[in-house]
Image: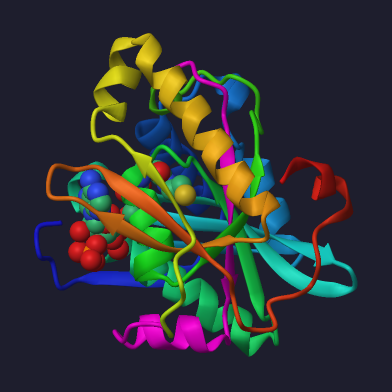
Amino acid sequence: MTASSSLALRALHEVEEFEACVQLQKDVWGFDDADLVPVRMFVVAHKVGGQVFGAFDGSRLVGYALAVPGDRNGHLYLHSHMLAVAPEYRNAGVGRQLKLRQREDALQRGIDLMEWTFDPLEIKNAYFNIERLGAIARRYVPNQYGITSSALHGNLPTDRLVAEWWLRSRRVEAVLAGRAPAPAEIQAEVRVPAEIHSWKDAGDARAEAAQTAIRDGLRAAFARGLAVLAFAREAGGAGTYRLGRWDEDWNYGPPRAEQATT
Ligand SMILES: CC(C)(COP(=O)(O)OP(=O)(O)OC[C@H]1O[C@@H](n2cnc3c(N)ncnc32)[C@H](O)[C@@H]1OP(=O)(O)O)[C@@H](O)C(=O)NCCC(=O)NCCS
């Protein structure tokens, strides 16, 4: 971001605002029309108790977050389906501000849990979700959306980790306050090589091999009852998922449809 001080966040309600979100979505993901989340879905999310928040630099929409409500064994939670920031505004805290706005709104509504999925090969997103927000992950969904038209997905199966953001947990409170969460004994590690992005861009077979190794490593650790509790970045750009046992009551239970996929 150009260190602009005029950035403002607000809830979006109007069709024109949702159209700006769809345009930003096209710019960020490069989806074909068939893969786009359309304006009508933003309208629906807004109407049924989801969230649509936008970040503006003056009148320009530079980021948005879209969430829909969900039910987990009788508990209301929010599934955050999309978070996008325009490329020239990244790494300046806009994404984090949008997540904090989502959290504030959820807490006001008495909601304790937000979830979203992310590509385990995306090192920045892993760091952002686990280290900057305090999310944990203990579920893995292979090829969640099928193979899509987005260049960001590199023609690979759309494997996803489920981020669970327990909004009132001591862990999240600590991380958001800039403190380290309670230390956990690390019992497994799964590394993502820095070259993954260039391999994906080039259609190099090593990208799929790395995806398979990471999938196998994470699923084996999850089967042992471990969760991703930390993500370590290396100077060269690689990153490592660090897994251990959790000690809080993060326990709405797995969604029935996903029980077989962890
Ligand atoms: C993911 C996304 C929304 C983040 O937005 P953002 O405004 O850049 O996020 P923030 O600036 O709040 O935080 C990004 C953090 O990642 C860090 N980061 C940046 N590049 C990184 C990299 N290659 N590896 C690890 N961490 C990285 C930044 O330093 C920053 O951390 P810091 O606050 O400790 O400095 C944005 O990159 C985006 O739109 N990506 C494309 C769409 C997407 O992947 N959406 C998310 C799906 S879960």
**Residue 74, image quadrant:** bottom right
- The residue positioned farthest toward the left in the image shown: 2
Using residue 152 as the reference point, say whether residue 34 is left or right of it. right
Which residues are the magenta region?
Answer: 155-181
Closest to the observer: 71 or 186? 186
Q: Residue at x 39, y 28 (%)?
A: 152
Query: Which is nearer the eye, 105 or 177?
Result: 177
**Residue 262, placed above or below residue 72:** above
Horizontal side of residue 191 vs 112, given as left or right? left
Magenta-drawn stretch contains 113? no
Q: Which one is in front, 243 or 37? A: 243
70 over 77 or under it: above or below: above
Q: Can residue 62 be seen in this view?
A: no
Q: Which colour scheme is used?
A: rainbow
179 part of magenta stretch: yes
Q: State whether residue 178 appears in this view.
A: yes
Up/down of 10 relative to 200, above or below:
below
Seen in the picture, residue 234 relative to 231 is either above or below; the reply is: above
x 52%, y 72%: residue: 102
Residue drawn at 62 percent across, 43 percent down: 219
Q: Position of residue 12 (x, y in %)?
A: 52, 63
Q: In which quarter of the image is the N terminus?
A: bottom left
Residue 212 locus on image (x, y percent): 52, 26
